[in-house]
Image (cartoon, rainbow, N blue to C red):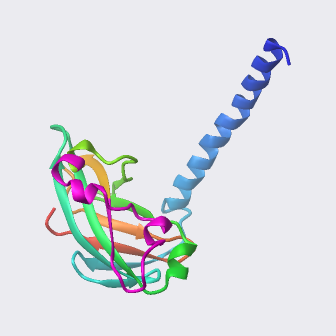
Amino acid sequence: MSEKRTFWTCLLALMVVLPLAFVVRAWESLRESRWLSTAKAEIVVEGGVKQAFAGGQWKLLDMRRLPRTDDARVILAEFEASPTDRAVLSQGACLVRLIDDKGRRFEPVSLTEPIVRKMYPDVAEWPRCGGTAFSDAKDGAAVRMAESFIVPAEARDLSLRIEFPGASAETLIFKWTRS
C-alpha cells in the first residue's frame, strides 16, 4: 500500500473510532446518571463492619488521607474480603469508587501513588480489587486489597462504593466517619 493510501486509511479509521469512543464513554456516564440508572439496591454499612456481598464477607479496614498538594489529597482505602463463594467472585469485575458528601465520584488511580509506596510500602503491594485478587484465595481466608484515589483537599464524608456487575445486583457502600 502506498504511503498516501495508508495516510488516508488511517485518517478515515480515526474519524470512525474516535467518535465511537466518545459515544461509548458518554453512554457509560449516562447509564450511571440518575436519568437512565436502574434502581440498584444499596447496602450501606459503617467502616470496620463485616458485610456479606458478592460471594464474600467484606470489611473496610481503613481510609487514610495522605498529603499530595495544597489542593489535593491522596486517599488510601484498605479493605478485605473473605471469599465464601469464589465462583460468584470470579463472575464479575470489581468496580471501586470514592464518593464525597457533594456526590462527586472519584475513580482509583491506575498506578500506586509514590506517597503510598513511601509511607505504606506493605500496603502498596496488596492487590487491587478484581478477580485476580481472589485467584489464590481459599474460602474464608481474608484477601486484603488497597486502592488509592486523588481527591480535592476539601472533600469530606467519604464513602467507598464497591460494585460487582455480573456477580451482584447490589452495591456495597462503606461510610467512613473519620474523614
Judging depth in this view, the residue of 135 and 69 nearest the camera is 135
Residue 123 counted in the magenta span: yes
The residue shown at (30%, 54%) is: 148
Name the quadrant of the C terminus. bottom left
| Residue 116 position in % (x across, y down) | 23, 50
| Residue 130 position in % (x across, y down) | 46, 65
Point out the residue furthest to the right here: 1
| Residue 78 position in % (x across, y down) | 26, 65
The residue shown at (43%, 67%) is: 133
Above or below residue 66? Residue 142 is below
Residue 154 counted in the magenta span: no
| Residue 128 position in % (x across, y down) | 39, 60
Q: Is residue 101 visible?
A: no
Q: Which residues are magenta?
A: 117-146
Please give the count of numbered marks on the rendered protein.
Answer: 0
Q: Is residue 142 left or right of residue 85?
A: left
Judging depth in this view, the residue of 151 and 113 nearest the camera is 113
Q: Is residue 35 left or right of residue 19?
A: left
Q: Is residue 145 visible?
A: yes
The residue shown at (27%, 62%) is: 77
Q: Quadrant of residue 42?
A: bottom left
